Image (cartoon, rainbow, N blue to C red):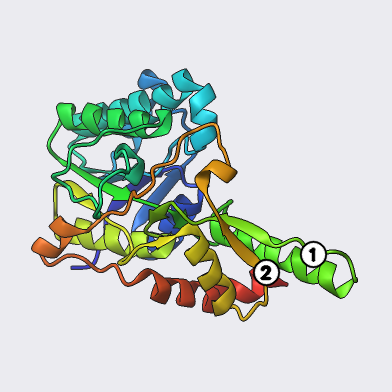
């Protein structure tokens, strides 16, 4: 069943939000808002906006996603990711609109020896993960017309992400080599494992979930897992770029926020209901490179 109707999308200028707006606009009445149009932290403003738009579906893609920034801005992280989500859920309940909320693999601690499934107990080790989990719980307490999609290692054409960073660094290394300058191999962490997921895969999965009228928590990542180092190697292999890249440990690349060692997700519930449309991560990456590689490399 094709998705139609009036849809409100928050975070419309983010890397996922832009693809949601572009994909759904041709056949749906889409209103996209970002912080300039709607500060989701302000409950009265949120209620007023949703009453005026009266969406039939609200897709909540707005978030404070700077994992390291969240560690030093705890109040802001919870205001946006938890209270902002609560405000939107209250508004959705009032107008009778189901809501899609994107959560994260970081709600888990990352010390399990196999991918996490929906029934596993969340135990975040970062402020970012804790604030997103608080958003899950806040919305769930308010109403049942809710879909929570846990996504991970997201990349796309818009915004900052790992794929674009690797391509930029690879290009800089190639330029240095051509100029006869010393070339330093790229160091990429090899002891953190997850599911790289293209934004367009998430858009397709969101459409499928809404078309099936699903409710509840679902993991929604590309199939298969890989380390950041393995992901980087595959990126360069896919674009046929000869880049010197070497593995390193998390300890060699310290960050303000502790990263989970293995935050891989398994789309168990989507598969159980026959609604999983996620492809292997390497296949999705190949299509992404085919579509945008030339723009990102040159």
Q: Is residue 109 left or right of residue 226?
A: left
Which labelled disc corresponds to residue 142?
Answer: none
Q: Is residue 269 above or below residue 58?
A: below
Density class for disc 2 (Cα within 10 Å; few <14, some 14-19, many ≥20) is some
Quick one: quadrant of the C terminus?
bottom right
Q: Is residue 177 left or right of residue 206?
A: right
Q: Is residue 9 above or below residue 190?
A: above
Which labelled disc corresponds to residue 244?
Answer: 2
Q: Residue 174: x percent and y percent?
A: 77, 71
Q: What's the residue at 18%, 68% (across, down)?
A: 1
Q: What's the residue at 56%, 78% (across, down)?
A: 237
Q: Are marks 1 and 2 in contact (CB under 8 Å)?
A: yes
Q: In terms of depth relative to the viewer, which is nearer, 154 or 49?
A: 154
Density class for disc 1 (Cα within 10 Å; few <14, some 14-19, many ≥20) is some
**Label 1, label 2: how far apart the Cα atoms are:** 8 Å
Q: Residue 52: x percent and y percent?
A: 34, 33
Which residue is the site of mark 1? 183
């Amino acid at each position: 069943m094709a998705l139609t109707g009036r849809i409100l999308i928050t975070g419309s200028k983010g890397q996922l939000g832009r693809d949601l707006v572009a994909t759904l606009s041709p056949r749906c009445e889409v209103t996209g808002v970002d912080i300039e149009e709607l500060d989701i932290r302000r409950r009265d403003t949120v209620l007023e906006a949703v009453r005026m738009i009266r969406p039939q579906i609200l897709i909540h893609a707005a978030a404070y996603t700077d994992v390291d920034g969240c560690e030093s801005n705890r109040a802001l992280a919870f205001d946006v990711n938890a209270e902002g989500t609560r405000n939107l859920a209250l508004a959705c309940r009032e107008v009778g609109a189901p809501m899609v909320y994107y959560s994260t693999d970081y709600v888990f601690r990352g010390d399990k020896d196999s991918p996490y499934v929906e029934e596993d107990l969340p135990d975040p080790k970062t402020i970012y993960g804790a604030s997103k989990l608080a958003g899950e719980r806040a919305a769930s307490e308010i109403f049942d017309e809710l879909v929570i999609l846990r996504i991970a290692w997201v990349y796309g054409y818009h915004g900052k992400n790992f794929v674009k960073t690797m391509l930029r660094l690879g290009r800089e290394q190639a330029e240095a080599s051509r100029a006869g300058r010393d070339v330093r191999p790229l160091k990429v962490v090899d002891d953190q494992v997850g599911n790289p997921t293209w934004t367009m895969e998430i858009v397709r999965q969101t459409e499928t979930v809404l078309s099936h009228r699903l409710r509840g928590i679902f993991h929604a990542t590309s199939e298969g897992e890989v380390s950041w180092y393995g992901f980087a190697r595959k990126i360069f292999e896919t674009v046929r770029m000869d880049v010197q890249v070497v593995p390193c440990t998390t300890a060699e690349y310290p960050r303000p926020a502790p990263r989970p060692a293995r935050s891989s997700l398994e789309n168990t519930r989507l598969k159980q209901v026959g609604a999983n449309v996620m492809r292997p991560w390497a296949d999705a990456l190949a299509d992404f490179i085919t579509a945008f590689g030339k723009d990102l490399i040159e």
